[in-house]
Amino acid sequence: MPVPCRNCPLRRCDIFAPVTEQELAFLQRFKSGELKVAPGMQLLMEGSNSPQLYTVLAGQGLRYKTFASGRRQVLNFVFPGDFLGLQAGMMGEMHHSVEATTEMVLCVFDRKEFFNIFRHHPERAYDITWLAATEEHFLGETLATVGQLPAVARMAWALMRLFNRAEALGMTTGDSFPMPYRQQDLADALGLSLVHTNKTLARLRDHQIASWHDGHIKIHSHAGLAESAGEEAGESAWMTRPLI
Amino acid sequence: MPVPCRNCPLRRCDIFAPVTEQELAFLQRFKSGELKVAPGMQLLMEGSNSPQLYTVLAGQGLRYKTFASGRRQVLNFVFPGDFLGLQAGMMGEMHHSVEATTEMVLCVFDRKEFFNIFRHHPERAYDITWLAATEEHFLGETLATVGQLPAVARMAWALMRLFNRAEALGMTTGDSFPMPYRQQDLADALGLSLVHTNKTLARLRDHQIASWHDGHIKIHSHAGLAESAGEEAGESAWMTRPLI
DNA sequence: CGGTAAGTTGACTTAAGTCAAGGCGGGTGG
DNA sequence: CCACCCGCCTTGACTTAAGTCAACTTACCG
C-alpha cells in the first residue's frame, strides 16, 4: 500500500530539490509507514510529544494555537511537502496543533531515528534546518502583516501567498486554486473577526479582484491583488525546497 | 583582544548547555573574530547576504522588518547568546534587519565554514536546528499574541517574556531588568501605535504592576502581570539552550 | 422535513489610531 | 552660560477601523 519514496508523486514537482538514488534509499529506511486521516482530525496536539514526524503527501490542513479563552491563532496553512512535528522532534513537545481540513495522506517517520539523520546524513540535516529557517521566515512575514497592515491588505497578502504556494505545487487551474477552509479559519489566521473577514472578502469580490466559490478561490486580477496588499508584491519566484 | 571560547563569560550562565573541551576547540577554530558595534548601528540588513554569522556576546538589539510605507514590525528583542544571520547562512539572504540598541560585542563566524558544522559536528548542527525551531516557536507565540490579544495583554505578555529572558541570563537585579529600547520599539513589536503603547504603559504603572524608568523596567506585581496577560502564564521554566 | 453549520448583511459599540500640544532633559554652539 | 533644538515621553480631544450582536439565507444531511 505505501508508496516507495522513489515513486513519490511529489518528487515530480519541480519546486522540490532532486535527490540521489542513494539518499532516496536512506529516506526509505527512515520512513516507517503511511497514514491517511479524515477531514477534521487532529494530527498533532499542542503539549503532546508525538513519537512521530510526518511529511504531507497529499491534502491540506492548518497549524494553530488555542488560548484558554477559546480564541485561536492559525499560524499557517499546511500544504503537501510540509514537514510536521519538528518542534516535538527537537524540543520534545509541540507548541501548536495541526488539524486536517481535507483528507490527508502522511508519510510517517520515527522520531527515534531523528538524530541519526544528523549523524549520518549532513545534507538531510541541512535540509531540515533549511525548512525550520524557512518556517521562521514565513512566520516573521505573517507577524509583520498581521501587526502592521489593515484588513484588506492582510487578506490580499494571504491570498497571494496561498496562490503562489498552490501554483508551485501544480494545484492551480488557471487562476483558481483549492481553498478547503472556512472563513473562520482565514479570520483566525489574519487576526480579524469572522464578520469583518466576510466583509473584506465581499470588498475584494465587488472590486473584481478575487472571489471564493465551492471551496476554490479565483483571482480575477493579480495586479489588483498585489496593489491591495500594498507593496511586498514580488517574492513570487519559488525557491526550490527540500522534501524529506 | 578576542576572548577565547573556553573563557567565554556567557558559558558561566547555566541556561547554556555545557560543552566538552573538544567541542570548544572546534568552535574556537570556527570563530573568526570579534566585533564591537556602537548603539544604533545596523548589523544585518534585509536583503543583504552577509558573509558573516554572529553570536551575541554582550549588549542588546532588535530584529525588524520594514515596509515600503515606512511601517516597521519588530520581530524580536535580541539578547546575549542569540545567534544572528542564520537566514543568510541557509537561504543566502536576510529577510529582516538587525540593529544594535546598546553597544554590542559579537562573536564572528565565517559563513564559508558553515556547512562544515553539519558535516563534521552533528551535535552542533542539531543545536543550530534547535535554535531555529525555538525561534520559530517564539515567533508563533508572538503572532498569536499580536493577532488575538488586546493591548494590555500584549504588553503584559511582552514584559513577562523580557523579564524571563533577562532573568535566565542573570541580567536582573531584584524585580527589574534593563530595557534599552524606546516606546516606539515596543509599539512596533506589539502592533500598537506609539500613543496607545504609552497609555497602556501608564495603565500598568497606575495599577502598580510595572513601571519603566532610566532604561529599566521594574515589575511590581508578577501576579498582576500574569493576570493582565490572560493565561499563558506558566512557561517561565527556562530550558537550557545551546550556545554556538 | 427539522436541524445544524457556514455564509451574508445591517445597526451599533468600542478599542485603538490619529492629531496636536506640551514637557523634560541633554547636547551644542553662539 | 544661556538659548535653542531635537529626540523622546505624556496627555487630551476627536476619528475610524474593526469588533459585537443579531437576524436571515443557504446548503447539506439524516
Image: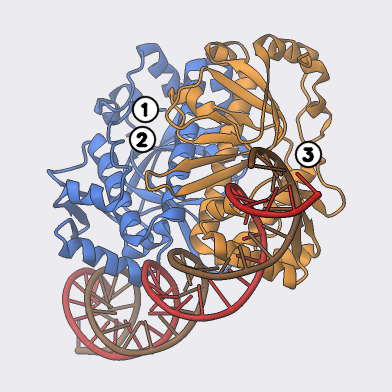
Chain colours: A blue, B orange, C brown, D red
Determine the chain carrying the residue at label 1.
A
Foreground: A241 or B13? Answer: B13
Asked if labels 1 and 2 touch by Cβ distance under 8 angstroms, the answer is yes
**Which amino acid type is shown beneath numbered disc 1?**
Arg
Name which residue lies at 56% across and 36% down.
B133
Q: Is residue B222 visible in this depiction of the protein?
A: yes
Image-based side of B117 in relation to A105, left or right: right
Image-based side of B99 in relation to B164, left or right: left
Q: Residue A241 carries which label?
A: 1
Q: How far apart are marks 2 and 1 (CA)?
A: 9 Å
Query: Residue B89, position in %: x, y?
Result: 50, 22
Q: Distance between the residues labelled 3 and 1?
A: 36 Å
Q: Quadrant of residue B204?
A: bottom right
Determine which residue is flagged by label 3. Answer: B169
Name which residue lies at 82% across and 33% down.
B13
Q: Give above or below for B126 relative to A33.
A: above
Image-based side of A111 in relation to A26, left or right: right
Query: Residue B243, position in %: x, y?
Result: 70, 27
In which quadrant will I find the C terminus of chain A?
A: top left
**Which amino acid type is shown beneath numbered disc 3?**
Leu
Mark closest to the chain's N terminus, 2 or 1 = 2
Determine which residue is flagged by label 2. Answer: A81
